[in-house]
Image: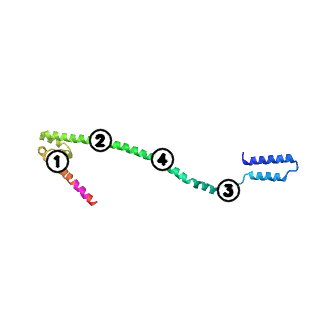
Amino acid sequence: MSRLPRSLVLWLALSGAALAAGGDHADPAKDAALRAIATRDAPKEVSAQDFVAKEPAKTGYCANIADAAADARFAWQKEQLAAMEKQVEERIRLLEEKRAEYEAWLKRRNEFLAKADESVVAVYAKMRPDAAALQITNMPDEAAAALLTKLNARTASAILSEMEAARAANLARAMTESGRKDATAPAQAQKKNQRS
């Protein structure tokens, strides 16, 4: 029940009891008391002053709990950051494992290629110059020049003498250019570093 019906019921009950007890002669003091109670319990109209009066209490409440709310927010953020940090550490660990795996694979691959290069060089070194010249003639210039560079000078010259003159000249030029590139690369890197 709302306050209006209860106070109205109370007022009616008391006034009914007063009329029944006193008949036509009601006590004016009792009537005044009953009217005061009914007025006090009756709902009031809401005005703008009621909101203005209540606002400082709300502001005070918010100001009183601001530090506690900020502490709770910081604690929550700290927990979130700790959880994210664990996730990042786990991902870093997984990446480190993958990196180590790839490094091991790359090392095995490079060892295999080095062995393959050594074995190919050994094969061409043991071949007759005319047979080696026929096979090297069909290779790309860079691969042929790299192979001839790894052979000893006597074997490489014998193979080049069995080739056509133009092809032998192209391979000899590629061999000398690769030698210059290897020798000049560190010098050029030093010049660039000095300029910077």
Q: CA distance from mark 1 to mark 4?
A: 67 Å
Judging depth in this view, the residue of 171 and 56 nearest the camera is 56
Residue annotated with mark 2: 104
User: Which x, y percent locates residue 108?
Assistant: 26, 40
The structure residue drawn at horizontal position 39% and vertical position 44%, both measured from the top left corner, is: 91
Mark 2 or mark 1: name the one nearer the start of the chain: 2
Under mark 4, the amino acid is Glu
Is residue 175 visible to the viewer in this orientation of the structure? yes
> Mark 4, mark 3: which one is toward the viewer?
4
Label 2, residues with CA under 10 Å away: few <14, some 14-19, many ≥20: few
Label 3, residues with CA under 10 Å away: few <14, some 14-19, many ≥20: few
Q: CA distance from mark 4 to mark 2?
A: 38 Å
Label 1, residues with CA under 10 Å away: few <14, some 14-19, many ≥20: many
Q: CA distance from mark 4 to mark 3?
A: 42 Å
Q: Quadrant of residue 195?
A: bottom left
Is disc 3 placed on a helix, strand or loop? helix
Mark 3 or mark 1: name the one nearer the start of the chain: 3
Residue annotated with mark 1: 171
Judging depth in this view, the residue of 17 and 172 nearest the camera is 17
The dot on residue 12 is none
User: Which x, y percent locates residue 112?
Assistant: 24, 40
Q: Are marks 3 and 1 in contact (CB under 8 Å)?
A: no
Q: Which region shows up in magenta?
A: 185-192
> Mark 3, mark 1: which one is toward the viewer?
3
Q: Are marks 2 and 1 in contact (CB under 8 Å)?
A: no
What number of labels is visible? 4
Mark 4 or mark 2: name the one nearer the start of the chain: 4
Under mark 1, the amino acid is Leu
Under mark 2, the amino acid is Ala
Residue annotated with mark 4: 79
Residue annotated with mark 3: 50
Q: Are marks 1 and 4 in contact (CB under 8 Å)?
A: no
